[in-house]
Image: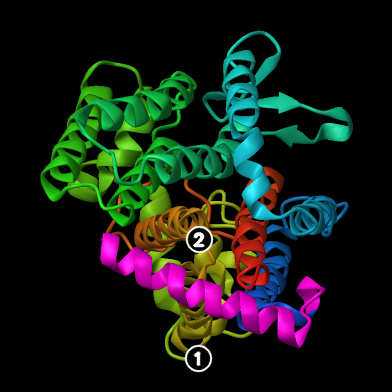
Amino acid sequence: MTTSFEQLSSRSRRRRAVGKETGFHSWTENADWWLLGSVLGLIALGFVMIYSSSRSIVIDDPLYFVKRQSVALIVSLGVFFLIMRIDYRRFSTYSLVAYLGTCIALFLVLTPFGSDSRGAQAWFQLPFGFQLQPSEFAKVILIIALAGFVNQHRDEIDPWRLTLIVGVALIPLALVQLQPDLGTNMVLLSMVIGLLAVAGVKGRYLLILMMLAITGVFVVLNLGILKQYQLDRLTVVLDGGDKKEGASYNQDQSKKTIATGGLTGQGLFKGPQTRLGFVPEQQTDFIFTAAGEEFGFAGTSLILTLFAIVMWRTWRIANLSADFYGTLICSGVLAVFVFMIFENIGMTMGIMPITGIPLPFMSYGGSSLITCVACIALVANVHANRFS
């Protein structure tokens, strides 16, 4: 690991020299347009699918969900440009403050300041009917905070420091679980393990952490922390045949909707399952089913290709980073996206449990969109500053 990092540092010094010679003064001149173009394509497809899957829900205003998502997109763009104006290395300086602020927000959402929606005390109610979900923002804050700590001690991650890192992560994890939100915690756990793996933590330690994570999930499932309908959603992939009229309805309709699309799809806005609203929460957790029915295998292959490009470019930027901190940030973002994409699409096809994890950039939800765009902004920031 030390040798590879020294090689990375040597390449970085050469790139900085090249950057000064060629005069890269603006991130727009040094942007990864493969990454940004793919993200914009996914967001655009998401808006089309949100409209298609929700236009019959609010009869008086078919654009109701699209308008609200548009507000989130405007905020997301503001967050993107704000992050791009600041060298990503400066974020580590304020990571402790951001981390403490996130923990406070996660605590306050559990008090009367928070609001209950769909069985979880996870949102702050904002004016005009908007909601803010602090557990979503915890993803990007934890990436910045843990990457900063790991970067400072990358050659000294012994059992004591590893315990400290896990302890730092457990505080927001515990607060999120009290909401309860096992799905978000699974994303956070995958990020922590992925980040530590890239940092060079010994394999036996990672194996112990994965076993502890699996044990934690098992404990949550058996201690009554989750409500019964949440347990049914998580276990329906194993015993869906016994709950046809209950928890498996969403997944049954989801698989049927995707199958209806066939090879080329039913056509935009022509999917019968989507048009008649047979898939509950289709504009959020099950947005992929709308694409599957209307665009078919061909269309969903395009979506998967765009996601693959995002993953590829993020991994590439991690390797091109000017320092190890940038590599860790990109690795954390990559772990978050890989897990979210696999889990969300997997649950629509019946191979993964239903956890309520949104599909990045496409699912309806302001907090999710802002967080995903913020993560991409961090990756783009690392790329733009790889010569400095």
Which residue is located at x 53 percent, y 42 percent?
139
Provide the major secondary structure of the magenta segment.
helix
Q: Name the residue type under label 1.
A: Thr
Within-10-Å neighbours for mark 2: few <14, some 14–19, many 20+: many
**How far is disc 2 from disc 1 in space, using C-alphas?**
45 Å
Query: Which label was assigned to residue 264?
Result: 1
Q: Which quadrant of the rendered structure holds the N terminus?
A: bottom left
Q: Residue under circle 2?
A: 323
- x and y, in percent, of residue 146 in the image: 46, 39
If you read the primary sequence from the N terminus, does the residue marked by circle 2 or circle 1 appear first?
1
Q: Secondary structure at mark 1?
A: loop
**Residue 21 lies in the magenta stretch:** yes
Question: Which residues are drawn in magenta?
Answer: 1-28
User: Between residues 375 and 316, which one lies in front from this camera angle?
Assistant: 316
Quarter of the image with the C terminus in it: bottom right
Q: Nearer the viewer, residue 293 or 299?
A: 299
User: Residue 339: image x %, image y %?
Assistant: 38, 56
Q: Is residue 5 visible?
A: yes
Badge 2 amino acid? Asp
The x, y position of residue 199, in whole percent, is: 33, 52
Q: For the point 37% across and 72% down, which residue is it?
A: 7
Q: Is label 2 in a helix, a strand or a loop?
A: loop
User: Is 247 on the left or on the right of 100, as rendered?
Assistant: left
